[in-house]
Amino acid sequence: MAMSINVSPSLALSVLGPLCALIMVLIHRESMRRRSKKKLPPGEMGLPWIGETIEFYKSQQKNRLYEEFVQPRVAKHGKIFKTRLMGSPTVVVNGAEANRFFMSNEFKLVISSWPSSSVQLMGKNSIMEKQGEAHRLLRGVISATLGPAGLEGIVPEVCKSVKLHLEKHWRNSETISLYRSTKVLTFTIVFECLLGIVVEPGMLEMFERVLEGVFAPAISFPGSKFSRAKNARMEIQKMLVDIVRSKREEMERRPESGQEEGMLLSQLVAGLIKGEISEEEVVDNVVLLVFAAHDTTSFAIATTFKMLAQHPNCYSILLQEHVNIMSNKSHGETLTLDDMKKMTYTWQVARESMRLFPPIFGSFRKAVSDIEYEGFTIPRGWKILWTAYGTHFNQEYFPEPMEFNPSRFDAPIQPYAYLPFGGGPRLCAGHQLAKINILIFVHYVVMQYDWSLLNPNEPVIMDPLPIPSQGMPVKISPKLN
């Protein structure tokens, strides 16, 4: 006769609880044992969660991330070192070979890893968050508009915007804030030349409120930077959804209306109509593009003028280049894409300015599996940070790196050493648009105005992106023709 044994639930729990706890302890010990066999990069992890975040932010706010944070640790630990930033164990890498390794292994060994606040404000459906095929699809749509054929049509529109801006804001002024002026201009160019959206009063200020929160803690208590930014983002989203839906109705009613040259919004909405991308993806990528194409470009323009003011010999060479270009054109004839190609020295000046003052300090990646690199193991889930400063200020790639020398770009630069626009699959899709914005603005200013910076040694600070601390005030006077 079979016997049955009744076990009370309380007895079962009293046995299973400690057993589960023991199993978890054993698993944790085994994980620690395996990890202990891995050779982690040298470095200091600092306090739990906080790590070295305070030192990182302090140096970044003064725009001295390389001098005060990266360089001392490289001197102590070498080109690759570990730390803890914003709660995450992080490996900081330096050098062109490290940049090449991690950027070329995007989607394979590493993925983009932005702070939660940035993701929420830029949009989880933006290209910066997309991986693999989804990223390639969206990048293809954007690149098609910003390729040679698209830029050919955009150049005359940018020229028109620059001339109108100078006439409206510069013509009757004696001093202007160069940085603020270029922010207004580049914002207008993105909206009107690239997206076909008329800029209304208050739109720039709305986007600026979003920018204030992109690196702030993602805490939504009333009055916080992130909370204010999130509210502004909701306003922007509502505005853009209305614009996208209106554009879709127009293109479905009149398909030929989607063929405008250079209109990125038309290309995105065409993808929406075909079912290739969603409405959320259209909106989020427009938001990202506005930030990527105007904030960094306006800073690059400002630092270009800063360097020209400090180096009058370089300004003389640059000015002559523009005089020569106009000598072959009739009065009132606008610039073309071919004229941009003739501005070789001007672009060298801009490139050297962006080397010394990178518009972006670098970017975070996350390891999707354990990575073996340079004899070290970077564990799965750890962050990897590359910085533009790690090569831009290194004499191995740029002799006498703190000197302003546009002619260093006469010779080819080692791949992955010069990274003002990033690199690899995540190279900024709008870098060619930034180039023509810079060249066209410089052209019209130097040909139409005498100018001088009121404070040529004005410091650059981070708030949260790099900006001239005083807005770069400039004394101007129209040239007499």
Image (spheres, grey):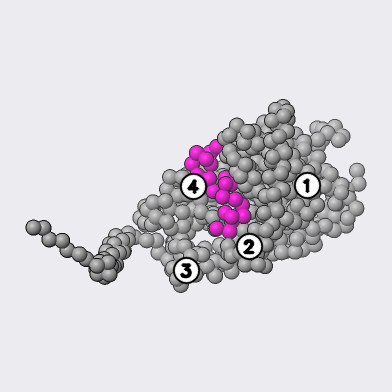
Q: Earlier in the sequence, mark 1 or mark 4?
A: 4
Q: Amino acid at mark 1?
A: Val
Q: Amino acid at mark 4?
A: Met
Report x, y in % for residue 426.
54, 45
Report how many numbered discs are placed on residues in the image: 4
Q: Earlier in the sequence, mark 1 or mark 2?
A: 1
74 vs 314, nearest the viewer: 74
Mark 1 crowdedness (10 Å alpha carbons): few <14, some 14-19, many ≥20: some
Which mark is nearer the camera, 3 or 2? 2
The residue located at (43%, 53%) in the rendering is: 367
Quarter holding the N terminus is: bottom left
- C-alpha gap between disc 4 and disc 3: 27 Å
Is 120 a magenta residue? yes
The circle drawn on residue 178 is none
Report x, y in % for residue 44.
43, 68
SS for callout 2: helix
Location of residue 90 with respect to 317 vertically, above or below: below
- Residue at label 4? 103
- Residue at label 3? 49
Location of residue 169 with respect to 132 vertically, above or below: below
- Residue at label 2? 226
SS for callout 1: loop
Q: Amino acid at mark 3?
A: Trp
Q: Is residue 180 left or right of residue 31?
A: right
- Do callouts 3 and 2 mark residues in contact (Cβ within 8 Å)? no
Q: Earlier in the sequence, mark 4 or mark 2?
A: 4
- Residue at label 1? 199
Magenta residue span: 116-137
